[in-house]
């Protein structure tokens, strides 16, 4: 079905290349189909390609994808890589957020005592009883009539600072409609007006805002809340009135650099912000470089009215989703709620440490849903997906981390199904595990394997790190550093060729040359293993003829990129002194004092490195490295922060 959909969009581009025209035609046809109660395929222009069944059933998903393609192209990115938030996923997030709120239906009044029916001696008791009943009724009204939520239990104002085509509010209308089925027509209409007037939806694209307004109008009609062709009645809002409200509710603006257009702070903010690095903006624009520099400068200098910088977590090459998350926590009122869909890498990557500290130390990070890359929650996207749940203000004492989740565990009724795996991270142990970086470990699904990982983390968390001068191998005080292989395979491709016996050149080592056999890891290169088949991938790109020379000493190297399907995260091996390393391989730069110590204890540097490699390939360290991996790339800081226990402290992890 996915391939059919992709083919349909490609055929549509051939018939109608103007993406704005595609959006306008689609949403107009959707309204026409809604008005007459017919499939949207019957209202599309004749020259449009035939709509596959997979797209026929959800016009909103097509609108979301058409808009994502338009925005990708306007950013200079490929429309083929565009994706939109699946409606079912959006509804599951809303269902989870609202599952503890209930629709406020009128209760039958509690009985009171008539004073005239009682003897004079009971009058004081009856007056007190009646006062208690009155207080209970007033208190119940205060809980639901304070303007902080609708009668259907939806917190208002409801905000989305990157609304796109409006998938979250459209799904919110469905929940609102289901919860108001026992209301009278007048009650439902009034509560719908309260909800619409409590919407705060923003987007930087005029095209997106126009699509969202029109889409929400159609969604309201489909829910029986708006009359598309008239002035409305006691149960429905008229089209003109709805359009006026939506014009104020959905506005064009920049949530990051601009001021929030509404005065009242949101009670609930739900959003899937752009997952886009600043350096990837304006790729196709002729003045893209200057535009990116100006955007970065403006974001760094954006200040609040009191002069303080708006973004305290802006570091390095920033991805926009981080700024939207920080901004969302600023916008929502105290004790309000933020739900945001971001990349799963936020849980562990070093560049997100300031953001995680803000979430933990100045807010209450309550839950996280983590979907690994292979679940493809967003069709066509291989990146892991994370759903954050935050209550603004205070600090975090316990966070419930769900994962690794499967796409089948999403529920539009309860958010997640009841058997979804989770663990609770409590502040004392969490602090020790991460040294205050608040990373969240990547856990396996199997309960036995989860216990092994937790045991490894608990045993290693207090050990010195590989790069620290306090570790047992490095008494000199000179740090052990992790370096990337000296050959950039892209820039030096002309000097890299197939290995041929007797040909000029030296061995070129890359990730493919690391071999695991049983519990041992070694280098499998044709220069050192003549039995390698002539068709083997180890022979391709295995010879170096460029000007960079070998280091002249053996080195302890680590495979820099590990396939997600392999059992191991890191593979350590000793590379001979006569080879060069590609940039897909990392190696340890050991101080001379450390090398001398290894040679003295083991007879030679090479033997000492083999002993050290076996130590680093231990089961405990592998469990640790897989638990704290941000992604498939092995970053230098990840290796440098490995716990480094003495060999006698290494043991098998079991339950």
Image (spheres, helix red, strand yellow):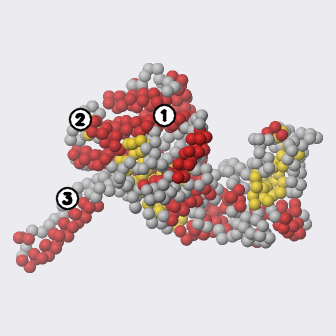
Quarter of the figure with residue 107: bottom left
Q: Position of residue 99 (x, y in %)?
A: 39, 55
Q: Residue at x 39, y 42 (%)?
A: 251
What label does residue 392 carry, if any? none
Q: Secondary structure at mark 1?
A: helix
Q: Residues within 10 Å of mark 3 (few under 14, many from 20)?
A: few
**Image-based side of 341 in relation to 177, left or right:** right
Q: Which residue is mark 2?
A: 231
Question: In terms of depth relative to the viewer, which is nearer, 59 or 114?
Answer: 59
- For residue 476, above or below residue 303: below
Query: In 3D space, how far apart are the residues under numbered discs 2 and 1 (Cα atoms)?
Result: 31 Å
Query: Considering the numbered disc 2 on the image, is that residue within a helix, a strand or a loop?
Result: loop
- Please, is residue 422 above or below residue 245 in the view? below
Marks 3 and 1 close (CB-CB < 8 Å) = no
Q: Residues within 10 Å of mark 1 (few under 14, many from 20)?
A: many
**Could you tell me residue 237's position as x and y percent?**
26, 40
Vertical placement of 517 versus 80: above or below? below
Image coords of residue 318 (percent x, y): 58, 50
**Is residue 329 at least partly visible in the picture?**
no
Q: CA distance from mark 2 to mark 3?
A: 34 Å
Q: Residue at x 64, y 56 (%)?
A: 629
Q: Is residue 172 left or right of residue 89?
A: left
- Mark 3 or mark 1, earlier in chain: 1
| Disc marking residue 108 | 3
Dot 2 and dot 1 residues touching (CB under 8 Å): no
Residue designated by label 1: 66
| Count of numbered tags | 3
Q: Quadrant of residue 620?
A: bottom right
């Amino acid at each position: 079905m996915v391939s059919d959909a992709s083919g349909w969009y490609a055929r549509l581009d051939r018939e109608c290349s103007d993406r704005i025209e595609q959006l306008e035609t689609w949403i107009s046809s959707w309204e026409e189909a809604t008005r007459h109660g017919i499939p949207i395929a019957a209202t599309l222009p004749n020259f449009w390609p035939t709509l596959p069944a997979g797209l026929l059933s959800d016009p909103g998903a097509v609108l979301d994808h058409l808009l994502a393609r338009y925005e990708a192209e306007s950013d200079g990115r490929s429309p083929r890589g565009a994706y939109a938030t699946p409606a079912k996923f959006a509804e599951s997030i809303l269902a989870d957020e609202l599952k503890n709120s209930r629709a406020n239906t009128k209760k039958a009044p509690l009985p009171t005592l008539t004073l005239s029916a009682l003897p004079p001696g009971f009058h004081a008791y009856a007056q007190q009883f009646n006062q208690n009943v009155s207080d209970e009724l007033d208190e119940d009204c205060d809980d639901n009539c304070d303007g902080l939520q609708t009668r259907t239990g939806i917190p208002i104002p409801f905000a989305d600072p990157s609304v796109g085509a409006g998938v979250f509010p459209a799904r919110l209308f469905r929940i609102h409609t289901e919860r108001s089925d026992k209301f009278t027509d007048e009650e439902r209409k009034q509560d719908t007006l309260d909800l619409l007037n409590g919407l705060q939806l923003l987007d930087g694209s005029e095209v997106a805002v126009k699509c969202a307004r029109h889409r929400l109008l159609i969604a309201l009609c489909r829910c029986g809340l708006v009359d598309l062709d008239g002035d409305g009645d006691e149960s429905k809002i008229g089209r003109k009135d709805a359009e006026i409200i939506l014009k104020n509710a959905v506005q064009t603006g920049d949530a990051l650099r601009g001021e929030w257009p509404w005065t009242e702070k949101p009670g609930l903010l739900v959003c899937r912000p752009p997952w886009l690095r600043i350096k990837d903006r304006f790729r196709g624009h002729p003045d893209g470089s200057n535009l990116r520099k100006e955007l970065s400068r403006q974001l760094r200098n954006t200040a609040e009215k009191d002069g303080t910088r708006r973004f305290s977590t802006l570091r390095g090459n920033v991805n926009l989703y981080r700024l939207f998350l920080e901004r969302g926590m600023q916008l929502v009122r105290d004790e309000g709620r933020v739900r945001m869909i971001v990349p799963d890498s936020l849980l562990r990557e070093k560049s997100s440490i300031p953001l995680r500290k803000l979430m933990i130390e100045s807010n209450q990070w309550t839950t996280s849903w983590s979907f690994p890359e292979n679940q493809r929650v967003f069709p066509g996207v291989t990146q892991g997906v994370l759903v954050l749940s935050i209550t603004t203000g205070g600090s975090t004492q316990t966070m419930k981390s769900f994962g690794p989740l499967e796409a089948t565990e999403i529920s539009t009724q309860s958010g997640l199904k009841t058997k979804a795996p989770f663990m609770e991270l409590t502040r004392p142990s969490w602090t020790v595990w991460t040294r205050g970086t608040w990373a969240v470990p990547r856990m396996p699904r199997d309960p036995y394997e989860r216990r092994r990982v937790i045991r490894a983390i608990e045993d290693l968390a207090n050990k010195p790190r590989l790069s620290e001068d306090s570790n047992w191998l490095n008494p000199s005080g000179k740090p052990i550093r992790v370096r990337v292989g000296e050959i950039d395979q892209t820039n030096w491709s002309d000097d890299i060729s197939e290995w041929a016996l007797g040909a000029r050149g030296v061995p070129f080592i890359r990730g493919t040359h690391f071999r695991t056999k049983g519990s041992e890891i070694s280098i499998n290169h044709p220069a050192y293993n003549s039995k390698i088949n002539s068709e083997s991938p180890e022979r391709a790109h295995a010879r170096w003829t460029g000007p960079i020379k070998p280091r002249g000493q053996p080195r302890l190297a680590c495979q820099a990129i590990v396939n997600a399907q392999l059992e191991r995260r890191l593979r350590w091996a000793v590379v001979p002194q006569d080879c060069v390393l590609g940039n897909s391989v990392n190696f340890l730069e050991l101080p001379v004092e450390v090398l001398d110590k290894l040679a003295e204890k083991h007879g030679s540097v090479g033997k000492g490195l083999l002993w050290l490699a076996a130590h680093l390939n231990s089961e405990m360290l592998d469990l640790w490295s897989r638990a704290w991996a941000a992604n498939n790339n092995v970053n230098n800081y990840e290796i440098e922060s490995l716990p480094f226990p003495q060999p006698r402290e290494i043991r098998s992890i079991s339950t």
